[in-house]
Amino acid sequence: MIRQMGFAIRGFLQILESLTLAVVLAVGLASCGMSSNGDNGMSMGAVNIGVTDAAGDFLSYSVDVTSLTLTKANGTVVETLPQRARIDFAQLVDLTEFVTGATIPAGNYVSATLQLDYANPTSPADIEVDDGNGNPLKVAAANIRDGQGNQVTTMSMTVRLDNAKPLPIAPGIPALLDLDFNLAASNTVTNVPTAPIVTVSPLLVADVNPDAPKPHRIRGPLDSVDTQAGTFTLFLRPFNLIQGNHGRLTFFTDSNTTFEVDQVTYVGSAGLAALKADGPLTATVAIGTFDLPRRSFIATQVLAGSSVAFGTDDVLTGNVLSRSGNTLVVKGAALVRNPGALIFKDTVTVTVDSATKVIKEGVGIAAIGDISVGQRVNVFGKLNVAATALDATGTGSLVRLLVTQLNGVVSSASSGAIVLNLARIDGRPVGLFDFTGTGTPKADPASYQVNPNGLPLGIIGNGTPLKVRGFVEPFGAATATDDFKAITLVDTTNDPAALVVSWPLLQASPFNSPYPPSGLVVNLTNSQLHDVLRGGVDVPLLTTDTPTVQAANPTRGLFVIGTNGTVQVYTQMSAYQTALQSSIIAGRMASGFVAFGGPGSYDGTTKTLTAGVIATALQ
């Protein structure tokens, strides 16, 4: 995604590209309406809190979350986290995972505070970055630093909500709050590849009742199933925890909900019946979407029983780099040990055999021959002591073929084949993959053949930046016109856009004056990063450019100023402009700036981004 640049700033750019390595606290109030409960008759509401991330080049960002508090307008502080939680934020991509459900007093909540522990003596923070070529670089504990150059041991991050839009907690009134630990404005990485240094200047972004929340995931033991109502309820036990009670949450299902229960696939009511038959306390993972008007969660995918990644097996998730016979080399994004521990390992050798069960996500039973180079996989088996090899042979082992994503530029397109100059597979540079044995001829990333599989091409043609999701053709079966079968084609020309700017040496005048109505003109002088990102495509600007950021809705946006870990949120652009001017006049200087727009929000001719979220980090 990121253009090739000098090692001195490459890792920094790649981390910033991920845009929102986020702590999103999805505060969904489900089944509200409780009262008293030992609280002297005080009205209570049930709050569900989760975390999220977006795809990027942090290979690991694993830290302990020790506390998560909400503060009421009257100063009352409520702790919502029942126990310390170890979270690798880099493993959460484009969804929100619930971490706790708590019953808290009703009222207006005006701020939230997150406590992170980077220096747990028994399990210190594990941060690994990409060296620019897809290889991991571990960040030493002494090189995780704050803005003053001191080693970070603990970090407190507070976000204050706009006074005009607090978070209301009340019986029977569900709500949703997203808090976004914005990587682009919160972290810089230098000294790559010698000894990378991560400087953390946390910036949280908050949005009450967002219009388009991400999909949500919940993990934990099954509590109950109601086949008549089409619902199931889980005890929250996030991030592969084997024990603990973090609350409960109910998901609705419909005829399109897909299930994989004990490695057997179902759709709709048949899957719900299979889930019920497994009984209470069955290990379950559900992914669903939040229906804002109805304030309910609709499950789109459910895994249960032996199909879940926290059971008796070790589980590897990653992409196949090469294959020789029944031996695979997998680039590992995550390894879940059977006790529940999550570790990162660069590459793992996987062995399969004729007894290995293979399931293609959303399709059903497949064969070991369907596992080919580039394919993203979930592998259940037994890991060796050194965590370098995983045995997935014999009855009970499983390889799940996951939807795989390609990014590249179209060389030619027809109804029979799209030819891609392939840049990345699931974010990994194609130079990491050995396509030997994939077919006759073997797959060529410079001329990668995508079968549109009947999908309409629209205006996709030569030069189109394209994102393709689907499955790699079986090993040895690739042809001169078919390396990959698509299930979706996304022309990223008009994708949601982001402008990311950093001033490592600080900028006293980050915006040109006077400010235009409902907008800002960004001063790129002395900036180290000055890029527009759309759907995985990076367009660098010049330091002499003067991009304009225009508020999409000046009276209901998300406009943020972060200063040394404390954040103030504004919903009106005029108030934001006034606050920025006051801070800069007072001597504050900018270290980072990000702005996010929707589809078609960036005009490359005028270099104007129409954004719904604007954030500035000051020191």
Image (cartoon, helix red, strand yellow):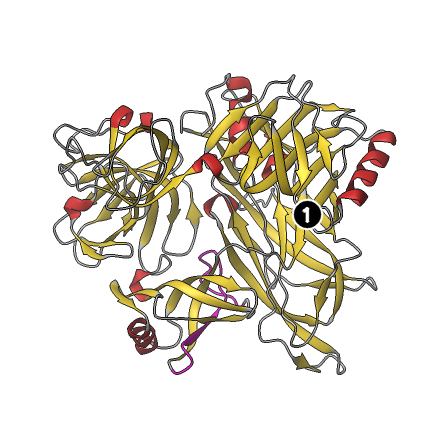
Q: Quadrant of the C terminus?
A: top right
Left or right: where 513 falls relative to 98: right
Name the residue rendered at 65%, 40% in the picture: 153
Q: Amino acid at mark 1?
A: Asn
Name the residue rendered at 38%, 31% in the picture: 464
Q: Provide the residue designation for mark 1.
A: 553
Q: Secondary structure at mark 1?
A: loop
Left or right: where 551 falls relative to 296: right
| Quadrant of the rendered image containing residue 562 | top right
Q: Position of residue 589 (x, y in %)?
A: 78, 28
| Quadrant of the rendered image containing residue 9 | top right
On screen, 463 above or below 475?
above
In the image, residue 184 lies in the stretch drawn in magenta: no
Mainly helix, strand or loop, the magenta region?
A: loop
Which residues are the magenta region?
A: 228-245
Q: Position of residue 132 (x, y in %)?
A: 45, 25
Name the residue rendered at 30%, 44% in the picture: 456
In the image, residue 233 lies in the stretch drawn in magenta: yes
Can the viewer see residue 312 in this picture? yes
Left or right: where 158 falls relative to 366: right
Q: Position of residue 94 (x, y in %)?
A: 48, 48
On screen, 504 above or below 389?
above
Residue placed most toward the observer, 433 or 534: 534
